[in-house]
Amino acid sequence: MTKVLQIILYPISLIYGLGMQIRNLLFDFRILPSVQFPKPVISVGNLSYGGTGKTPHIEYLIKLLHPHFFVATLSRGYGRKSNGFIIASKRSNVKYIGDEPMQFLKKFEKIKVAVDEKRKRGIQFLYQKYPNLDVILLDDAFQHRHVKPGISILLTDCGLLYTDDYVLPSGTLREFKSGVARANIIIVTKTPKIFSPITRRRILEDIKPLRHQRVYFSYIKYGDPRPVFETTSQQFPAKVTNILLFTGIANDYPLREHLARLCSDLVVIKFADHHAYKPNDIEEVIKKYHDLPTQKKVMITTEKDMMRLKTPELSTNLKNLPLFYVPIEIDFHGTDKELFDNEIIDYVKKN
């Protein structure tokens, strides 16, 4: 977005931000009710509209906790065609529960995955159905003020810190920056794998954490590309000239940078975040792929997009093509990992 357009849209941003500020004040002064549950609830969210890496951070928490505790995730289920409280099962599909919950369901068999647009109701139902549940992880719930989590984790992208951003529509923030005060933990995501102490200090000076807040720094670890369809025997080639990347996520710049190092030419087709793929979208992707002037070519998408592609109407034309996804996970720099892990585990144990 250009500076001129930001200036033009700024009055609208002020009105939107003031509306959110009034809403927050109603919760702060307990005019609107907010519930804190006696059992552990951990929220992962952000100030901005998507793209900070919530899904891999939720997965990190699952991997950290579920060997020792009975864990559930609770999401809104963005883009699903259903309503109300649903506990995912083997019969669930992406249209029924949404792409992120579907990803959790496929990767973690021993946890409970639930969706509910009303998080308070969802938490109540989960603890009623599973009294021995140890902890609930709330996905994208920083603005969901009807629930006060035991730990609120706020994510901010290293490439666009909330301190450098503006409220919608002149920026990507969902509320004024002052909302960060509700966070117990701030994680600066998508930092470089080689991360200098000087950059760390500069970011901390920008953030200026409050006394009750801890700041940690995470980075993305990419796995080897894997076939989207388990039935295929496709192997990712040792040498690739062209990669066609298509995504429906909010922020794909780290993946672009990673893939650019694996090929001579990276071609990108970008759809909207949580895009519901249609057959004509797939036809567009396949045509673009066939138009690439080389035999050493592949298509790549994200793990989250993969969940939306595995439907009969879409998969038929893709199954015989070299289509891969890149698995990702996050890790923390230096001593941040031990400190973060201990803080989370201690909280769950004590509560």
Image (spheres, helix red, strand yellow):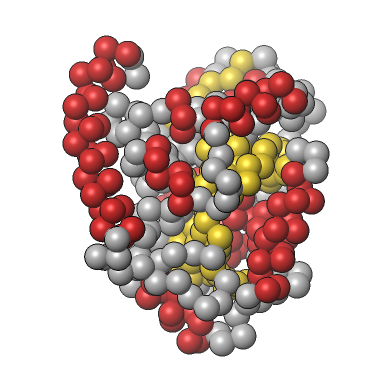
Quarter of the picture containing the N terminus is top left
Say if residue 17 shows up in the picture.
yes
Q: Residue at x 48, y 87 (%)?
A: 128
Q: Of residues 326 and 113, which is closer to you in this image?
A: 113
Residue 197 location, quadrant: top right
- Residue 189 appears at what percent x and percent y? 60, 37
Say if residue 308 shows up in the picture.
no
Q: Is residue 125 above or below residue 176?
A: below
- Residue 307 appears at what percent x and percent y? 52, 53
Question: Is residue 30 left or right of 293 when viewed as pictured?
Answer: left
Q: Residue at x 80, y 39 (%)?
A: 334
Q: Of residues 198 and 73, which is closer to you in this image?
A: 198
Q: Is residue 49 above or below residue 242?
A: below
Question: Is residue 17 left or right of 304 when viewed as pictured?
Answer: left
Q: Residue at x 34, y 38 (%)?
A: 176
Query: How many numbered marks have been drawn onto this rendered protein structure?
Result: 0
- Residue 238 appears at what percent x and percent y? 79, 28
Q: Of residues 45 and 53, which is closer to you in this image?
A: 45
Q: Residue at x 32, y 13 (%)?
A: 3
Q: Of residues 158 and 315, which is closer to you in this image?
A: 158
| Farthest-out residue, front | 211
- Residue 48 appears at what percent x and percent y? 42, 39
Quarter of the picture containing the C terminus is bottom right
Question: Is residue 204 left or right of 66 when viewed as pictured?
Answer: left
